[in-house]
Amino acid sequence: MPMAEAIERFVPDGATVAMSCALEPLIPFAAGHEIIRKGRRDLELVGPISDALFDQLIGAGCVRRVTAAWVGNVSEGLGHCYRRAAEQGIPRHIEIHDHTNFSIALALWAAAWNAPYIPTRTLLGSDILKTNPGLVRDGDVVRVHAVRPDVAIVHVQRCDAQGHAHAWGPMGIVEEAGLAANRVIISCEELVETDVMLKHPNRILYPETKVVAVVHEPGGSHPSPVQGYRERDHDFYRDYAEASRTREGFEAWLKRWVLDVPDRASYLTRFG
Amino acid sequence: MVAIASREIRDGDLVFVGMRLPILAYAVARSTHAPNARGLFEVGLMRDSAASAYLGTMGDPPNVTGALWATRMSNVMALMAQGLVDLGFIGGAEVDRFGNLNTSYVGDPTSPSVKLPGSGGGADIAILSQRWVTLMSHEKRRLVDRVSFVTSPGHGDGSPGWRRRNGLLGGGPAAIITTLCVFRFPPEGGEAYLDSVHPGHSLEEVQKETGWAITGARDARVTPEPTPAELTEIRKRSA
């Protein structure tokens, strides 16, 4: 299925969307950019550490709430669009539900198991408890309430047309995000035959019944790395950090790399 | 700073490594006094060697190649929750005299003057690892009397036993290592005291750049210089 169709059908305005779940690798930038082109609004983004993608979606005005452990640019520092939204309401006010990396994982496991919450000892003594109503101290534990995404969008190395996906490298919260979500969109470097995937059924990420779209999107995670396929493009992150320092700079960046680009294949041709 | 941080790693330690300087500190420790130290990364990795190429992030392919374990994040967090992580490194924008870190909001969280990126795994490390260390550029705006927002708790309000009373599992901050000096903490928690001042810097300079009245200054030593072996490792990896 083309990315444009997957986003059109399965990411409506107001949706709760889990992305960037492997932390710095395998970030579904192609899907995020299509969400921006479609002008989606009022999304809730769910993730652990988000490396630049959440910042771009916030800057593009797609986001109502961020439920995450960290939003910025990992090799460069602060997320300038995130700062403008949180500090000045530009381009719009956003609500922030802070998490830690561990607590967002637990919130998704709770949803995956359909448990109302998971008790944990992390977060005791942290002021994060004051800013997120889904984290509640109860005696000597903290209850991490379930977070259920409407859709999880995951980039992987290979997948078949039925949605049997293999990913490798560090997995962050990829597994629990997909199991917690009502639906999963997969984008993949390689679309392969089902018999290849079923030779290693233990490695299949999700039941095929959860996967609603498989998008063959080579390079769909650029500038983030894909183990065995692509290194991280550090310069691209640095240039984005520089450009997004001002609102005007961000808008010019967005026009050049997202709005004026019809799809990921065209984006990749811009690197010559 | 890197050499001092590397000496916090003991041989055989399981270390929750962060980015940038702690990665370098882990590499130096591995090559000098702690050949059996293992590194854990919250992205979902365990290693017993330093990566062979530059890392922009802990999830970059050179950090995955040669890993002992690539897994989901909650599995490495679970080791820490079981008390099996000996030492963690945490970065921060602000630290206070009780070792509490702020990486979330400067000013009122509902209307912040600066929105910082957030905890990441910092608060988890602060609460669950056996002991932790923070590395910080020594500036008055970063070393403050009390942080306005506690993202990663150190010794809380500074009263003895604060962590135990509040159910925090690990022992908390062992040291604040800055570009000018090293602060340490009493075993029962409380306020940071000055342990050593780096060669070429003065007590006056440290006090001028610190947002609280320093204690322990009378007994502070001069920080030992990096050894030739440490310097060789640092230079090899900073090129």
Image (tube, coloured by chain):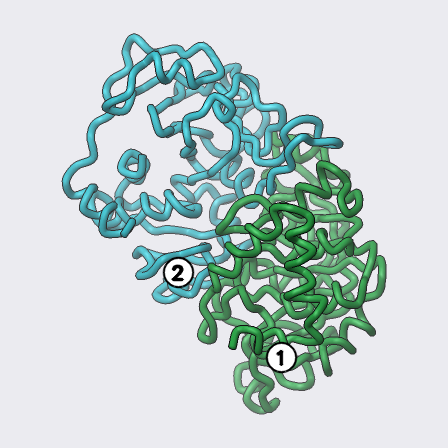
Give the CA separation, mark 2 to mark 1: 29 Å
Report whether residue A180 is seen. Answer: yes
Q: In this rendered view, identify the residue nearer to me: B99 or A35.
A: A35
Whole-percent x and y of residue B133?
41, 33
Q: Which mark is residue B210?
A: none
Q: Colour of chain B?
A: cyan
Quarter of the picture containing the N terminus of chain A is bottom right
Image position, residue A46 (x, y; %): 70, 54
Q: Chain of mark 2?
A: B
Question: Left or right of B93: which side holds A180?
Answer: right
- The chain that appears green in the image is A
Mark 2 lies on residue: B63
Type of residue at label 2?
Asn
Q: Are marks 2 and 1 in contact (CB under 8 Å)?
A: no
Which image quadrant for residue A222? bottom right
Name the residue type under label 1. Ala
